[in-house]
Image (tube, grey):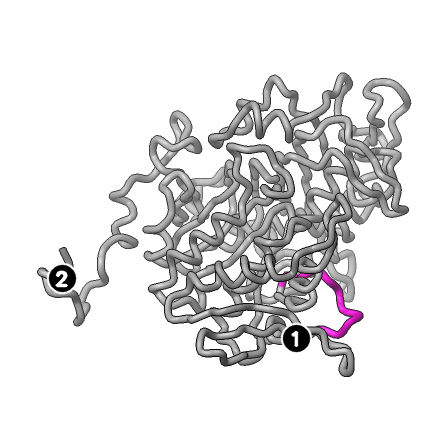
Amino acid sequence: MLTRLEVQGFKNLLNVNIDFGPFTCIAGANGIGKSNVFDAIEFLATMASEPLMEAAQKVRGASGVRGGDPRDLFWDGYREHPREMHLAAEMIVPDLVEDDLGAVAKATTTFLRYEVSIRYAPPSGESSIGRLVLTREELRHITRGDAPKHLKFPHSAKHFRSSVVAGQRRGGAFLSTEERENGTVINVHGDGGSFGKPQPRAAARAGRTVLSTVTTNDYPTILAARREMQSWRRLALEPSALRAPDDFSAARTMSANGLHLASTLFRIATESDRDGIEGDPEAVYARVSSRLSDLAGLGVEGVSVEPDPVREVFTLFLREQGGLRLPARALSEGTLRFLALCVLLEDPTVSGLICMEEPENGIHPANLPAIVELVRDLAVDPSEGPGIENPFRQVIVNTHSPGVVQLCEPEDLLLAEVVHKKVSDGSVVSSLSLLPFRGSWRATANTPTFSEVDLIEFLTPPPGRHIQLPLDLAI
C-alpha cells in the first residue's frame, strides 16, 4: 500500500507531496498532467524490476508514447541544466514474500520509506545517447510508534493498523548512500540491524537500483519492498483484450489490459480455498452477475465461463433475462470494463495498488453511481483487518468527469490544477499541484486546500446548454 508519494523534478511534478488512503480520486481538467502522477508510480514500480534505461523506456514520454528520450522524464529536460529527479514512497509491504528461488522470506518490519535520486548523464559522443545514473538510494523503516503520524487516513488502529504494521527494526537503514573518494556507494544492510558488515554497491556503475537486484531471501525486508512496488499496476482495460477467448494454457490472472478475463473468472469460480474446500462456481457467477446487473438497461440473468474441450478454449458468456446468450466479443465496451472490475472484486489474489485512468469511459451517465461504487469497493476497508473477505487493495483514479467528482466523498478527492512558481534562477514556471479538501485528513497547516467553491466547474451545468428539466420536474 502506497501511503505517501513525494516527487521532485519528474515531468511537470516540480515538487508534489501526496498522502494516499485506500481510495483516492484525482480530479482536474484535461492535459494538465494528472497522468504524470501515475507515470511516477509506474516508474518506481518498473525500476524495481528493470534497469534504469529500460524502465524509462516503458514510461510515457512527452509525446504520450513510450520508448522516447529519457530526458522526457525530467523537469524541463531539454534545457541545458543539471537534470535530476527525486522520488520517495512510504509504503506498507507484505510481511511474507517469496524470492526468485521459491523460498519464503519474512520481513523484519512492514512500514518503510524508500527514496531514490536519478540524474541524466549527457552522451559522450555524437553517436551515443544519454543515460540515467543512480545518485542516491535509501530504504528505512517507520516505527510502530510513528505509524499514526504517517497513516493519516481514517482507520481502525485495533483491526487495521495493528495487522498491517508489524515487526520492528533496532538498527539503521536497509539501504543507505555514502560518498567515498572513488564515488557514490549504496550500502546494503542486513535485517540484523547494525550487526554484520554492509555490502557496498557502486552507484555510478549499477545501471539499476540496488533494490531491484535483491532476488533471494538474504535481505527479506528489501525483498518485501521490491515485491510491494512490483505489485503496483496501471489498469488500462482494452476492449480487444477483454473480448478475446483464452486457450487452456493461458494465464489465469487478468493482465493490466484485461487479457485473460475468461480464464481468470474460471479460476476464481473453480479453485479450492486455503482449507482445500472446493470452489462454488454457481455462487461466484451469481455474485458477478448480481453486481453486473447494477448497470441500468442491462438485463442480466447470469454470467458463466464455459470450457470447450474440442477447441480447448474458455469463453465467457452473459445470459440476458430474455434467455439470449452473448459471448464476451458481443458485449459493449462499457459492459466489458465493468465486468472486468467485477471479476477483480472477486479475486482474492489481487492485492496492491491499482491505478485507473478515467474509469467512467464507455459508461452511460446513468451508470456512473454503479461504476464509482464498484471502484470504491475494490479498495480495502480500513475499519477492518485485511483478509480473504477484505483484500489489501488500494485504488487511485483520475478523472475530469463532473459526474464522478459529484459522487466522490470530498475527503477522497485531490483537485489537480496548474500553478505558477518562481524557481531559483528567478523565472516563473508552471507545475502541477494537487490540493486536498479543506478540513479533510489530507489537509495540513499552512498548505493550500480546496473547498466546494473551487469545484464550480464540476458542479454547475455547462453554459449555453439547450436542454434542461422543467422546474417542476427538477425539484
Q: Which residue occupies 53% across, 80% down?
A: 330
Which residue lies most toward the bottom here? 310
- What amino acid is labelled 1 in the image? Thr
Q: Which residue occupies 49% across, 60% down?
A: 290
| Spot occupied by residue 231 in the image (x, y as percentages of width and height) | 68, 48
- Compared to 119, does 357 lie above or below? below
Disc 1, SS: strand
Residues shaded magenta:
246-256
Give the main secondary structure of the magenta stretch. loop
| Spot occupied by residue 99 in the image (x, y as percentages of width and height) | 84, 43
Residue matched to label 1? 315
Residue matched to label 2? 473
What's the distance in space between the residues labelled 2 and 1, CA to CA? 45 Å
Quadrant (top left, top right, bottom left, bottom right) of the C terminus: bottom left
In the shown orientation, is residue 95 left or right of residue 454? right
Q: Nearer the viewer, residue 198 or 382?
A: 382
- Taking the magenta stretch, the answer to whether it contains residue 214 is no
Which residue lies most toward the left here? 472
